[in-house]
Image: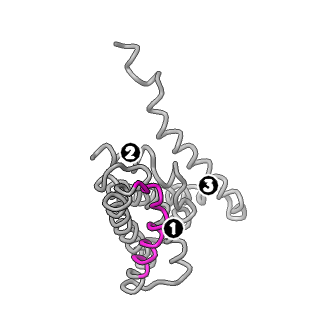
Amino acid sequence: MIDILFYYVFYSSAVLFYGIGFRRAAALSVSSFDKSVFRPAVRCGFAALASTFLTALITEKLFSPLGIAELFPLPALFILAAVAAGTGIVLPAKAVLQTKEFAVSYLIVLLALFESSRLFDAVLIAASCMLSFVFVIPVLSAVRYRIDIARAKNEKAARGILIMIVSAILIIACSAWNVSWLNDYFVR
């Protein structure tokens, strides 16, 4: 359980490695964390977790016995649309935010369902993917702040390139621990 959590939060972050919502995370790193950021994040997280649970349940109990388990992306889309509409009634937001949140939520649902073998694993992977946003957004915010301090104000065009370079360095740093010369294989 804990290995799945750490794998999808840090080592194979959904934002950095899979690219799910990277542009959204980079855009959120600019703004301060207030009600305008918190409400869509809660709605996106609840929609992703609820639709992952319902889709995994339907796939496990209905589609697998029939032998059509690989057809789950279409019901996942319909379930996510229904859950997102239900959460849109409770927590209203602008339509532009809803489309971005819907795309991120759907990709998280698909990743969780493709990578899991059980219902609990699917929900845990979806929660880990949402938690990876919590860790990546402050890092991107700190990088953006540091770039703004170091560079002149008229060179804003290169800021996006530098953020992509730093994110590539983060990906390499997360993956570098698994190379053979860092392991203790030769010591034994």
Assess whether residue 76 is covered by the magenta stretch.
Answer: yes
Task: Pick the residue in front: 18 or 159.
Answer: 18
Q: Residue at x 36, y 55 (%)?
A: 64
Q: Label 2 to label 1, Cα distance in Å?
A: 23 Å
Residue denoted by label 3? 150
Q: Residues within 10 Å of mark 2 (few under 14, many from 20)?
A: some
Residue 89 on image: x %, y %: 39, 86
Query: Is label 2 in contact with label 1 (beta carbons under 8 Å)?
Result: no
Task: Pick the residue in front: 47 or 175.
Answer: 47
Mark in front: 3 vs 2: 2
| Relative to 52, residue 111 above or below | above
Among numbered discs 2 and 1, the one appearing first in the sequence: 2
Can residue 137 be seen by looking at this rendering?
A: no
| Relative to 181, residue 166 above or below | below
Q: Residue at x 38, y 82 (%)?
A: 86
Mostly what secondary structure, the magenta segment? helix
Q: Label 3 to label 2, Cα distance in Å?
A: 33 Å
Q: Amino acid at mark 3?
A: Ala
Q: Residue at x 44, y 59 (%)?
A: 133
Q: The C terminus appears in which quarter of the rendering?
A: top left
- Residue 166 as seen in the image, left or right of residue 156: left
Among numbered discs 3 and 2, the one appearing first in the sequence: 2
- Residue 170 as seen in the image, left or right of residue 151: left
Residue denoted by label 2? 7
Residue 2 on image: x %, y %: 28, 46
Residue denoted by label 1? 28
Q: Write down the region rendered in magenta.
A: 67-85
Circle on res. 126: none
